Amino acid sequence: MLLSKEQIETLESEIVFKTSRSSGSGGQNVNKVETRVEVLFSIERSLVLTPAQKTLLLSKLEALQVERLVAKTKRMVLSVASEKYRTQLKNKSEAFDKLVQLFQKALKPKVKRISTKPTIASKKVRKEGKKRLSDKKINRRKVDL
């Protein structure tokens, strides 16, 4: 149920990029250049995602209590920001990558654990450990004369 390559490529058309001034170090351009990039994506309005993917994403993101999920005008909008780099272009690509990774992580199907029987060697090791502990406790007893 992960996103396909075609979905990832068309996902960018549904994204709104918003820029602002980045916090932290930046030298002379710190108060002039808007390098921080915020990606806004409406899960409910998306035409790229299937209805099953939408419900799974919303339920997983709400269960994880993601602060990025912002309710705007009664629609759930996902917000991911990046201000790691000093250029807007690098921050834009990193924010998009973060969004895709978040989607892939949320849409990854949970692998069900297959229960297995203990091996003969593990049973032997367990019994030897129990025997050692039993002998240790027997040796602690008082000796009858």
Image (spheres, rainbow, N blue to C red):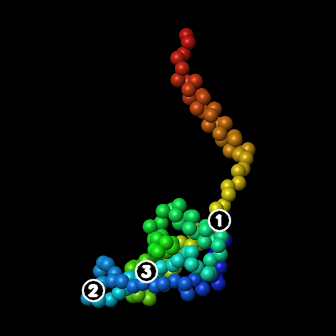
Assess disc 2: are there few (<14), some (14-19) or many (≥20) residues with their C-alpha within 10 Å of its C-alpha: few
Above or below, 92 against 65 in this view is below
Q: Residue at position x 39%, y 85% from top?
A: 19
Residue 94 location, x and y as percent? 47, 81
Three-letter code, disc 1:
Pro
Q: Quadrant of residue 82?
A: bottom left
Q: Residue at position x 72%, y 50% from top?
A: 116
Give the alpha-carbon distance from disc 1 to disc 2, as whole Å: 44 Å
Left or right of residue 98, residue 108 in this image:
right
Q: Which residue is mark 2?
A: 31
Q: Which mark is residue 109?
A: 1
Three-letter code, disc 3:
Glu
Q: Which residue is mark 3?
A: 38
Would you say residue 18 is visible in this rendering? yes
Q: Quadrant of the N terminus?
A: bottom right
Residue 18 location, x and y as percent? 42, 84
Give the alpha-carbon distance from disc 1 to disc 3, as whole Å: 28 Å
Assess disc 3: are there few (<14), some (14-19) or many (≥20) residues with their C-alpha within 10 Å of its C-alpha: many
Q: Quadrant of residue 133?
A: top right
Q: Which comes sooner in the sequence, label 3 or label 2?
A: 2
Q: Nearer the viewer, residue 132 or 100?
A: 100
Q: Residue at position x 27%, y 86% from top?
A: 31
Left or right of residue 137, residue 4 in this image:
right
Give the alpha-carbon distance from disc 3 to disc 2, as whole Å: 18 Å
Residue 145 location, x and y as percent? 55, 10
Above or below, 47 against 131 in this view is below
